[in-house]
Image (spheres, rainbow, N blue to C red):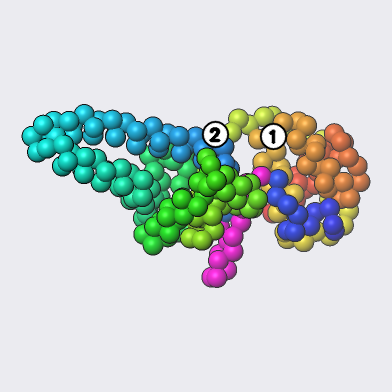
Amino acid sequence: MPALSSKRETRLDTLQSNELAEGVEIHLRTAGPYVRVLAYLLDLLIRGAVCLVAQLLLLLVGAILGAQVAQGLMLLLFFFLMFFYYIVFEAGKRGASPGKRVMGLRVVDTSGAPLSYGQAFMRNMLRIADGLPFCYGFGLLSTLLTKRFQRLGDLLANTVVVYDRLPKMQVASLPPVLESRAPSVPLSREEQAAVLGFRERAGMWSEARRVELADHASALTGSSGQQGMTRLLGIAHWLGEKH
């Protein structure tokens, strides 16, 4: 039935499923541009602090070995922080720079696997293109236009930025199920899972959000609004008893 055929509908959150070649389905919650910008600013502060400390130390080196040697070492440090800072931290199982780690983010392959050094190198070499024309203009535009919030480097390296840990959700109380209701029409296995999933996650949403989502199943419940939500919970209760 069209109201519950959620497979082809746009998802209402950033939790996305990906079916691998082995038939295994994984779920990744991709991170949007806002939290990624915060992680970038944290990394920028960290790199700035490293440069400041390095400059103070190189003043001593310059007094001993000469100003040219100190300047050369400083340029080498700038080069490393600009091009290899993210590569070193994001490749392998860690998958996150210090800023991303603080924000609970991680960079992974679109299959959910850790990044290879080749992917990390490719992803971060395109930061120059993402940074154009100013302040990550192309990168921000790309994240807003792609389903998985991928910038140009992500698209080329086949990577995504995901939440490594999810915030604890405050669960709200659900209205009591007054009547266990059998569905009026046969439901496929996927539709049954969608109804049961609604009941399992409903406590994470506000009352208005629960009603809004339940309205998508009005063809099944025969009603909308508060009554439709109550009926959908009754159907979910009936399905839960059968399972």
Q: Is residue 16 inside the magenta stretch?
A: yes
Which residue extends farthest left? 64
List x then y, in percent, for residue 135: 52, 40
Q: For the residue marked with disc 1, what is the amino acid? A: Trp
Cβ–Cβ under 8 Å for marks 1 and 2? no
The C terminus lies in which quarter of the figure? bottom right
Q: Earlier in the sequence, mark 1 or mark 2?
A: 2
Q: Is 128 positioned to the left or the right of 197 in the image?
A: left
Residue occupying image coordinates x 80% and y 42% = 214
Q: For the residue marked with disc 2, what is the amino acid? A: Lys
Residue occupying image coordinates x 21% and y 29% = 56
Which residue extends farthest bottom? 21
Q: Is 53 positioned to the left or the right of 192 in the image?
A: left
List x then y, in percent, for residue 142: 60, 50
Which labelled disc corresponds to residue 205?
1
Query: Which sits in the foreground, 39 or 199?
Result: 39
Q: Which residues are magenta?
A: 13-26
Number of numbered tags placed on the structure image? 2
Residue occupying image coordinates x 86% and y 50% = 220
Q: Quadrant of residue 33?
A: top right
Circle 2 sits on which residue?
168
Query: Which sits in the foreground, 90 or 138?
Result: 138
Instruction: Answer above or below: position of 42 versus 141.
Output: above
Q: Residues within 10 Å of mark 2 (few under 14, many from 20)?
A: few
List x then y, in percent, for residue 111: 51, 61
Q: Is 178 positioned to the left or the right of 206 in the image?
A: right
Q: Using the rendered image of the protein, determine whether residue 140 is visible from the camera's viewpoint.
A: yes
Query: Which sits in the foreground, 182 or 210?
Result: 210
